[in-house]
Image: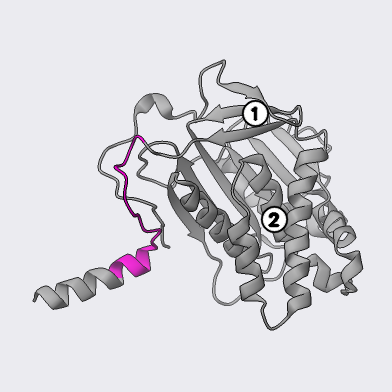
Amino acid sequence: MTSQVSSPAEQAEPADQQSGRMPAGGQRAADGGKEVRRLDRVIIRFAGDSGDGMQLTGDRFTSETASFGNDLSTLPNFPAEIRAPAGTLPGVSSFQLHFADHDILTPGDAPNVLVAMNPAALKANLPDVPRGAEIIVNTDEFTKRPMAKVGYDQSPLEDGSLDGYQVHPVPLTTLTIEALKEFGLSRKEAERSKNMFALGLLSWMYHRPTESTEKFLRQKFAKKPQIAEANVAAFRAGWNFGETTEDFAVSYEVAPATTAFPTGTYRNISGNLALSYGLIAASRQA
C-alpha cells in the first residue's frame, strides 16, 4: 500500500485534535442558507466494489485537497489482482484520505465519513467507523441479492443497526442515470459515472475546488468526448445535489495548512514515487 503527503511532516499530532471537530461556535451560514461548520481535520473513506472507481475517486479528491493547501495523507486499499465476484466482501476496494489545517503524520484510523457504494462496502468497513460518524450509502444497491451476498437478511438501512450513525441514503445510481439521460448512453455506461457523482457530492460537502477535476476528466477521456462530458456532468450533478437537497443541511470547511508550513512549493507524492526518488538520489551520491 502507498500513502501520499502534500508536505514534509516533522511533528506528532496533538492529542486534543483526535475528534477532528472545531470547538462550538466554529460555524457560519453559507450564502445559500445552509450551515457551514469549520473543522481542523477530516478522515474520509470511499469504499465500493473493485469496479466502482474508488481509487480514481480518492485520487481526484486528494489532488484537489492538495491544491487547496491542506496537509494530507492517504491509504489506498486495493483488492487482490484476481478480482473477487462483484458485490462480495473480498472484492471491496477503498481509499482513505486524512486532510487537515495542520501538520499530520498518518492516514488516520477511524473515518469521520464513509461513502459506501454497496452492501459489501458497508459491511466490510462499518467496524472501523465510530458512532456518530456520517455514512453516505448508495441505496440503489441495497436490494435482496446484493445484501444476501454479504449475509444481510434484511436491510441495515431499515433494521435500526445504523441508528448510532448519521446516515445519508442517496440513490447514487438512479441520480447518475437521470443526470446523463441527454447523452444517450446505455444504462451500464451511465452507471459507471456514479463515482463521479459521489465525488461531486463530497467536493460540495467539503468545499473542494472543481476545475482541475473537470480538466482531468476531459484529458483522461480525450478520445471519447461523450464519455468525458458525461463524467463531468455526473460530477456537477453530485455537487448540485449537495447544494439543493435537504438531507445535507451542513457543509464543512477545513482551512489550508498555512500556519504549519513555510511558504513554498510542495509535492503531492506517493510512496512508490518517493522510493524511486530515493534510489535515484542514492545512486547519484554513491
Quarter of the rendering containing residue 71: top left
132, 161: nearer the viewer:
132
Q: Is residue 94 visible?
A: no
Quarter of the picture holding the C terminus: bottom left
In the image, residue 261 sits, relative to residue 142, either above or below, namely above
Q: Main secondary structure of the magenta part?
A: loop
Q: Is residue 112 magenta?
A: no
The N terminus, quarter of image:
bottom left
Q: Which residue is mark 1?
A: 36
Q: Earlier in the sequence, mark 1 or mark 2?
A: 1
Could you tell me which residue is drawn at 55 percent across and 56 percent down? 95
Please tell me in which quadrant of the rendered image residue 133 appears: top right
> Residue 120 got which mark?
2
Q: At label 1, which amino acid type do we have?
A: Val
Q: Position of residue 262 (x, y in %)?
A: 29, 42
What residue do we see at 35% from left, 39% from top? 103
Q: Secondary structure at mark 1?
A: strand
Tell me which segment is drawn in magenta: 259-275
Q: Which of 133 and 152 lies nearest the eye of the viewer?
A: 133
Q: Which mark is residue 174?
A: none
Alpha carbons under labels 1 and 2: distance apart: 32 Å
Q: Position of residue 254 (x, y in %)?
A: 52, 36
Question: Badge 2: how crowded within 10 Å, few (<14), some, or many (20+)?
Answer: many
Q: How many marks?
A: 2
Q: Is residue 9 visible?
A: yes
Left/right placement of residue 104 relative to residue 145 reads left
Which element carries disc 2, helix, strand or loop? helix
Q: Is residue 25 above or below residue 56?
A: above
Marks 1 and 2: which is nearer the front? 1
Q: Amino acid at mark 2?
A: Ala
